[in-house]
Image (spheres, grey):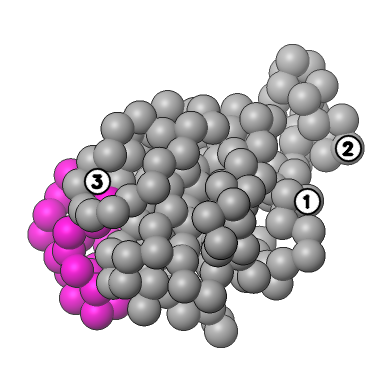
Amino acid sequence: MNRPPGVDGAAFTEAADGDQRNDLTARSAVSSWLGISRDWATVRQVHGIALVRALGPGELGEADGLWSDVPRLPLAVFTADCFGVVLLAESAVGVAHAGWRGAAGRVVSALRAEMSAHGHPPVRAAIGPGIGPCCFEVGADVAERFPDQVRETRWGARSVDLAAAIRHELEGLDVWLPGTCTMHDESLYSYRRTQTAQRIATIAWVA
């Protein structure tokens, strides 16, 4: 379990915590450790930019971002190479699932704008573990979506720095970024490394 230093109301799980999407025992253990409800608000992630406002727990349809100003309601997205992103306002939180399609579509910017439009401009953010440019080999079609973030993998192939692209969407905010790569850090789930069905949970809540 990883809680960003100085960021209350946000956490990222690691491999040892199990898959909180479907394993209620794992979800209960994580919730107990964090002191939050085991009843989370989630979405069916589709690698898009749709957003929902969470007024209560449960699965809230197809989306890749959700936000809420309901106290003590945990919001969660799930990743295994994509990035989970948390936005924190004074009295609201948001979470986004950002793979390359979401980053190209600027799902984090959309979530930031949505929260601001409802009177909750984010002031801090946390970007969870995801695949780094050291390992994120891509084709020309993906690279051309991120012309300023094209890099090279450890083995000399073309890659993209997705974390940097997401960080650019958070300009002006206090941002926490762990700098770990899911593909070569074996304490983290990585679909590219093992084709795992398990996921890291990104969780946020209004305290």
Q: Are marks 1 and 2 in contact (CB under 8 Å)?
A: yes
Alpha carbons under labels 1 and 3: distance apart: 29 Å
Which residues fall within the magenta stretch? Answer: 13-41
Q: Which residue is mark 2?
A: 148
Q: Residue furthest bottom?
A: 6
On whether residue 153 falls in the magenta region, the answer is no
- Residue at image point 66% right, 37% down: 106
In the displayed structure image, the side of residue 152 where residue 81 appears, left or right: left
Q: Which residue is mark 3?
A: 21
Q: Secondary structure at mark 2?
A: loop
| Front residue of 138 and 41 | 41
**Which of the 4 quarters of the picture holds residue 43?**
top left
Q: Position of residue 184 (x, y in %)?
A: 56, 49
In the displayed structure image, the side of residue 166 where residue 205 appears, left or right: left
Q: Are marks 2 and 3 in contact (CB under 8 Å)?
A: no
Q: Secondary structure at mark 3?
A: loop
On whether residue 26 falls in the magenta region, the answer is yes
Which comes before the other along the chain, label 1 or label 3?
3
**Which of the 4 quarters of the picture holds residue 25?**
bottom left
Q: Amino acid at mark 2?
A: Asp
**Can the viewer see residue 164 in this picture?**
no
Q: Amino acid at mark 3?
A: Arg
Vertical relation: 3 (above or below) 107: below
| Front residue of 160 and 172 | 172
Q: Residue furthest top?
A: 141
Which of the image's four quarters has the N terminus?
A: bottom left
Q: Which residue is mark 1?
A: 168
Q: Amino acid at mark 1?
A: His
Label at residue 52: none
